[in-house]
Image: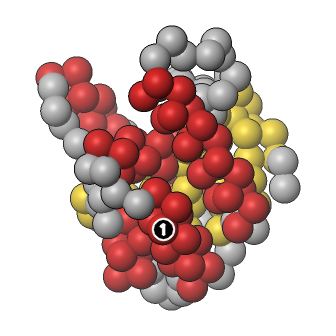
Amino acid sequence: MPSLFVIGGARSGKSRHAQMRAEASGLAPVYLATAQAFDGEMTARIARHQAERDGRWQTVEAPLDLPEAIAREAGPGRVLLVDCLTLWLSNLMLAERDISGALDALERAVAGAAGLVILVSNEVGQGIVPDNALARRFRDEAGWANQRMAACCDEAVLVCAGLAVRLK
């Protein structure tokens, strides 16, 4: 089945675009959530995203074991929406997991998925160079992860100001 990589900046409309594509597919939608609510602001963000999805959606929490969740949840007649890869990456970094190995597993899971997979990620490399080592490492890891996922997906779309531009 095909795969779609959707990338954009904060508040660019990338999640909305990915959700619209998932719903337009006519497949049973499954939302693979990578966020973890460590504070009130993130709890509110998660609640807002949940409110934007109707009763058709099933939600599966996958803050760390995303490749396993894709392999388990993918199937004919289903579309998986992963939102988002950069939160998953930050979870991996905080848990001191092997990022390269996790990305290898993610590529295999996407390539082997029996249904449509849509991956959402943040473009974080177009701003200023962060002033601390952890933020610079995150920016670098996100850039490398985005390159890998864009290469492995069948289609890639950049969303800016709510407008989608097909990259691949």
Q: Is residue 33 above or below residue 17?
A: below
Residue 122: x %, y % from top left = 56, 36
Is 98 or 153 nearer to us in this picture?
98
**What is the quadrant of the N terminus in the image?**
bottom right
| Residue 112 visible | yes
- The amino acid at mark 1 is Gly
* Residue 27 visible: no
Report whether 157 appears left or right of 167.
Answer: left
According to the image, label 1 marks what residue? Answer: 101
Relative side of 98 to 168, left or right: left
Based on the displayed image, in which of its 4 quarters is residue 45 positioned? Answer: top left
Residue visible at 26% across and 50% down?
Answer: 95
Asked if residue 166 lies left or right of residue 75, the reply is right
Look at 34% across and 38% down and name the residue there: 49
Task: Identify the residue shown where x is 84% and y is 55%.
Answer: 168
Q: Residues within 10 Å of mark 1 (few under 14, many from 20)?
A: few
**Mark 1 falls on what kind of element?**
helix
Please tell me which residue lies in front, 46 or 23: 46
| Quadrant position of residue 56 | bottom left
Question: What x and y, as percent, mark residue 44?
Answer: 22, 26
Q: Residue 105: where, in percent of width, then height?
A: 49, 74
Relative vertical location of residue 88 with respect to residue 4 in this rendering, above or below: above
In-front residue for pair 48/158: 158
Choose between 123 and 15: the one closer to the eye: 123
Residue 9 placement, left or right of 56:
right
Query: Compared with residue 102, is residue 63 higher up or lower down, i.e. above or below?
Result: above
At x 62% / y 79%, what residue is drawn? 111
